[in-house]
Amino acid sequence: MDIILLGTGSPLVDPNRAGPSTLVVTSGQERSDPGNGTSRQIFLVDCGRGVLMRAAAAGVGAADITALLLTHLHSDHITDLSDVITTRWVSTFSPNALPIIGPPGTRQVVDATLAALAPDISYRIAHHADITEPPRVRVYECTEGQVWDAAGVRITAAPTDHRPVEPTLAFRVEHGGVSAVLAGDTVPCATLDALTRGATALVHTAIRKDIVQHMSAQRVRDILDYHSSVEQAAATAARAGVGTLVLTHYVPPLVPGQEDQWRALADSEFTGRIELGDDLLRISLV
């Protein structure tokens, strides 16, 4: 199983970092084969700005995505939902609905996105003889429990704490004896601890509290209310006994040359493998 950090940015626009988005790629054949339990599956977790550009750089197209998992409906995590839906639609040459799994409210957001795309959809159907229907999507709303079980991949969701944004989710993806938990945006909470326990890796957002708490704008300091600091993310990984902590969604942006500072903060709470870096960082789990 590979984790690819497509976008490691935040709502703050950064020319070097796309919006929050992560790929989980299971091992197996390049093309999906429903009859083969080892076929490759590709799960996109959140779809922030620039997600498909980063996916293309990782060698993945919209048509390759097995399912889209949404941790929550904050705008920076769903900015490019319309691009994912539209590009998958026009680049898939056989009917293939996109499963979208997210918290309650996801269906309303997807329906509104399709409504906004209505003119574009009508133009393309009118222009292309082989496009005869709108994009196919299947929306599944959940708050906890198993949400996927196919071709050897099992995905479980659990609630997290990102209040006043609620409900919010974390996902645990398991395949071939390894597991990765995608925490999304959250403060430490018992439900995330339980979901993460014994996982191979935890992908977690990270805020530099030591920097943010001294910023002049209250609106920026407010983010400390509902995000984990680097130390808190690391402590979550330590309590769960994971092997690898992957940090992402850096606030403020991770500046080249400051990696050791971030790593030292995580090291204060977690003794395992720590991964942080730029967009397109790929971590292989075994």
Image (cartoon, grey):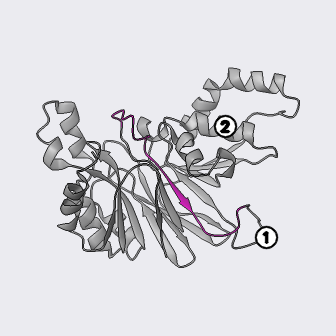
124 inside magenta stretch? no
Instruction: Work out whether 78 lies above or below 200.
Output: above
Quadrant of the image occupied by residue 113: top right
**In the rendering, at what x and y percent does residue 47 appear?**
51, 43
Q: At x 83% / y 33%, what residue is drawn?
A: 131
Instruction: Work out whether 128 lies above or below 85.
Output: above
Q: At x 35% / y 50%, what residue is drawn?
A: 185
Where does label 2 land, which residue? 87
Residue 95: tell me if it is visible.
yes
Name the kind of residue labelled 2 in the image: Thr
20 inside magenta stretch? yes
Nearest the camera: 61 or 222? 61
Which residues lie in the magenta part? 11-30
Where does label 1 land, which residue? 35
Nearest the camera: 15 or 193? 15
**In the rendering, at what x and y percent does residue 125 appear?**
81, 27
Viewed as shown, does residue 232 lie left or right of 161? left
Nearest the camera: 186 or 16? 16
Quick one: label 2, few (<14), some, or many (20+) residues within 10 Å?
some
**In the rendering, at what x and y percent does residue 207 appear?**
25, 49
Residue 74: tell me if it is visible.
no
Viewed as shown, does residue 30 lie left or right of 52? right
Extreme residue toward the right, this view: 129
- N-terminal of the pair, mark 1 or mark 2, is 1
Q: Main secondary structure of the magenta part?
A: loop
Extreme residue toward the front, this view: 257
